[in-house]
Amino acid sequence: MSEPVRVRYAPSPTGLPHVGNIRTALFNWLFARHHGGRFIVRIEDTDVARKVEGAVGAILDSLRWLGLDWDEGPEVGGDYGPYFQSQRLERYRAVAQRLLDEGHAYLCYCSPERLEEMRAEQVRRKEPPGYDRRCRDLSPAEGIAGVVRFKTPQTGHTEFHDLIWGEVVFENSTLDDFVLLKSDGYPTYHLANIVDDHLMDISHVLRAEEWLSSTPRHILLYSAVGFEPPQFAHLPMILGDDRAKLSKRHGATAITDFRDDGYLPEALVNFLVLLGWSLDDKTEVLSSQELVRHFSLERVSKTAAVFNRQKLDWMNGLYLRNLQSHDLAGRAMPFLSSLLPPEAERSLDGDYVLQIAPLIQERARTLAEFAELAGFFFIDELVYDAGLLLGGGLSRETAAAALAAAREGLHALKAFDAASLEAVLRPLAAELGLKTGALFGLLRVAVTGRTAAPPLFQTMAVLGRDRCLGRIEAALERLGA
Ligand code: GLU
């Protein structure tokens, strides 16, 4: 690439960022990193009425969590903050004024009521919507506030080359005289967007397909102001598995919800990149470094991508299984502590969690699931139905006798490790005339409160002698023995 690559992620803080928004951020970030260029974050907050409290925080948290770091911006506390359009209003006003002075724009005094009537009339007459240009040829009125509208050419066409879609052509007659500056002095998206893309030297605009129809307006604006337009690449839509546009209904919640539900950022990055990009027909698992190395717009598809929650769970499970135990233990900590009652939280000792991690790792798809599956390691008094103890078809008496015998065996053990536990418990089954499955099933329920749990002897070794004995005692009480 000859010119330096400078791309931007330009979210409007009108809601919490979701899969679609952050996929755009990720593609921009990868494109910048691949080309050794710069990635800029610009908050497009000029629609005051639609601003949502907390949205900016959630956008920045999501980017940071996923490791999508940005390269410049106004300095805040020794770090770069994002750019905020609301802090750059003078720049947009100056360009609007220039367009007015040079006859590319005009002041429109139509009241909201008049525009409303006009729209209703257009609907009645089945005419395409759009401003009817009533104020286009008025001479500017002194002292009356108006909006600034762009004088869109009424004939001809506007074309541009999209790096994903190829040649795109729009008839100018389908575009109306859109607003550039509102009566509150704030720019519209179109004006602020082209002014900033120009001032920030943006080389490539990578954004969602829904913005494709705004691009001819931008091209016309660039030409009226005399700015060189950047290159454009519109990223394919994301659909739910029912092929409808992705929404909350498909489980496409805010990115921060994925974090809170125990997804790993590296798994989500890998999952998100496949929503529209692929390396080849088969490779699905790619690290961030590999993505940076291979990412290219040539491999971005035009076909809508489908968001598949099961695939995300599968991929997250895969990344989770590949974590080193200490890494997994560290990441699981906050999930364990939020799951446990305050008294159990005290027993959240790092070494203990580290021993538990490999036992649960194979079975959990998310950190939240990890915490849920590991919960029994931390609870002082297990809650389960006494009937579970007899699940293997044992009578109350046999079960009680088996637990009492196991208790003796555990007391006598020198080393309380998995091998020693097996060495004493396996022969015990034969001594008691029980199938090993029946005895081990009984002990599993007694020490974990569950019928399905990680390997029994390892679990018992990690729980430790005191906890195991206490739990066997409690099981005996449950059996009324
Ligand atoms: N503010 C727009 C958005 O919310 C930006 C679109 C663009 O990248 O030009 O997506």
Image (cartoon, rainbow, N blue to C red):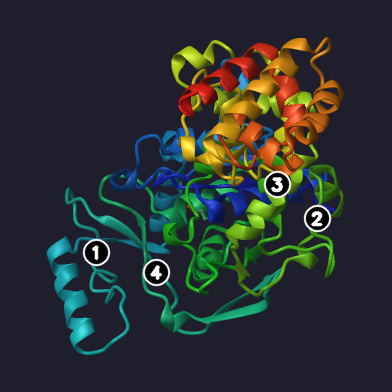
- Ligand 1 within 8 Å of the CB at mark 1: no
Residue extending farthest bottom = 125
Reading the image, the residue beneath label 1 is 139
Amino acid of disc 2: Phe
Residue ID at (28%, 87%): 127
Residue in front for this viewpoint, 253 or 263: 263
Q: Are marks 3 and 2 in contact (CB under 8 Å)?
A: no
- For marks 3 and 1 on the same chain, the one whose residue lies earlier in the sequence: 1
Q: Are marks 4 and 3 in contact (CB under 8 Å)?
A: no
Marks 4 and 3, how far apart at CA: 55 Å
Q: Which mark is residue 381?
A: none
Reading the image, the residue beneath label 2 is 295
Q: Is residue 324 visible?
A: no
- For marks 3 and 2 on the same chain, the one whose residue lies earlier in the sequence: 2
Residue 421 placement, left or right of 197: right
Amino acid of disc 4: Lys
| Residue 404 x, y percent position in the rendering | 63, 21
Q: Considering the image in quadrants, where does the N terminus appear?
A: bottom right
Residue 97 placement, left or right of 275: left
- Ligand 1 within 8 Å of the CB at mark 2: no
Marks 2 and 4, how far apart at CA: 39 Å
Marks 1 and 2, how far apart at CA: 52 Å
- Asked if residue 417 is positioned above or below residue 265 in the image, the reply reads above
Per the image, label 1 sits on a secondary structure element best described as loop
Reading the image, the residue beneath label 4 is 151
Marks 3 and 2, how far apart at CA: 24 Å
- For marks 2 and 4 on the same chain, the one whose residue lies earlier in the sequence: 4
| Residue 73 x, y percent position in the rendering | 60, 31
- Asked if residue 443 is positioned above or below residue 104 in the image, the reply reads above
Q: Given this view, does label 2 or label 4 mark the residue nearer the observer?
A: 2
